[in-house]
Image: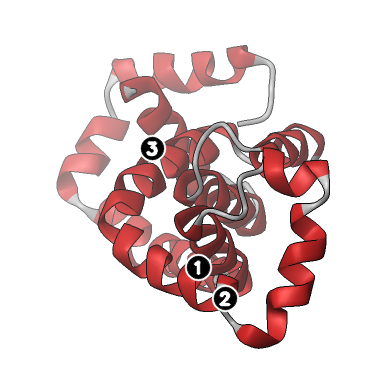
Amino acid sequence: MIEAIANLLKALNSETEPGQISLALCLSMIAGFTPMLSLHNLLVLLLVLVLRVNLSAFGLGWVFFSAAAYLLDPLFHRVGLAVLTSPTLTGLWTGLYNTTWFRLDRLNNTIVMGSLLFSLVSFVPGFILFNLLIRRYRVHILAWVKRTRLMRAFEATKFYEVYQSMSGWTGGAV
């Protein structure tokens, strides 16, 4: 867990495109808010592996959003109940329930349906918000940390030189 946090901080502080980190966090929001053993989470994992996203951000986001899901379950239940019991959508849900995919994904459960809809609706605003926060972090907080006396003293040490020379040994993108 500490290594994942260190990798995320390394990605935040590097020249990694903020969109890669934001996309990882948004995909982890879908995977974290919905139950782990769902078919749509397999699709999310496939997207994470195919697209170029930060795996540390995805992993930490998944843990964070899974914990937050327990607090948001009453909201997810209300959203799912409203959608699943809507009289205008009864024919749609009846038709979808007769498909294997719908039943295997347990989308007839109010919490599963509500959490999936909530995460899908908040995907684009979340991407924009995470992107903005990462850019602001880099401009304000990271710049401030680099200007502190403690950081400048640390950068002058031999340990920092060794760290800089060894940081490229990982061989892969963060």
Q: Mark 3 belongs to which amino acid?
A: Val
Local crowd at mark 2 within 10 Å, few (<14), some, or many (≥20)?
some
The residue that mark 3 highlights is: 63
**Above-or-below relation of 129 to 134:** below
What element does badge 1 sit on? helix
- Image side of residue 41 versus residue 57, left or right: right
Asked if the residue at tag 2 contacts the one at tag 1, i.e. Cβ–Cβ closer than 8 Å, the answer is yes
Place of residue 2 in the rendered image (x, y in percent of width and height, measured from the top left): 31, 23
Local crowd at mark 3 within 10 Å, few (<14), some, or many (≥20)?
some
The residue that mark 1 highlights is: 80
Residue at x-position 38% and y-position 30%: 6
Place of residue 125 in the rendered image (x, y in percent of width and height, measured from the top left): 56, 76
For residue 157, what is the image quadrant? top left
- Image side of residue 163 versus residue 28, left or right: left
Residue at x-position 31% and y-position 52%: 68
Asked if the residue at tag 2 contacts the one at tag 3, i.e. Cβ–Cβ closer than 8 Å, the answer is no
Tell me the mark number nearer the camera, choosing from 3 and 2: 2
Most extreme residue toward the bottom is 88
What element does badge 2 sit on? helix
- Image side of residue 54 versus residue 89, left or right: left
Can I make out residue 166 in this image?
Answer: yes
Query: Which is more N-terminal, label 1 or label 3?
Result: 3
Residue at x-position 82% and y-position 63%: 95
The residue that mark 2 highlights is: 83
For residue 141, what is the image quadrant? bottom left
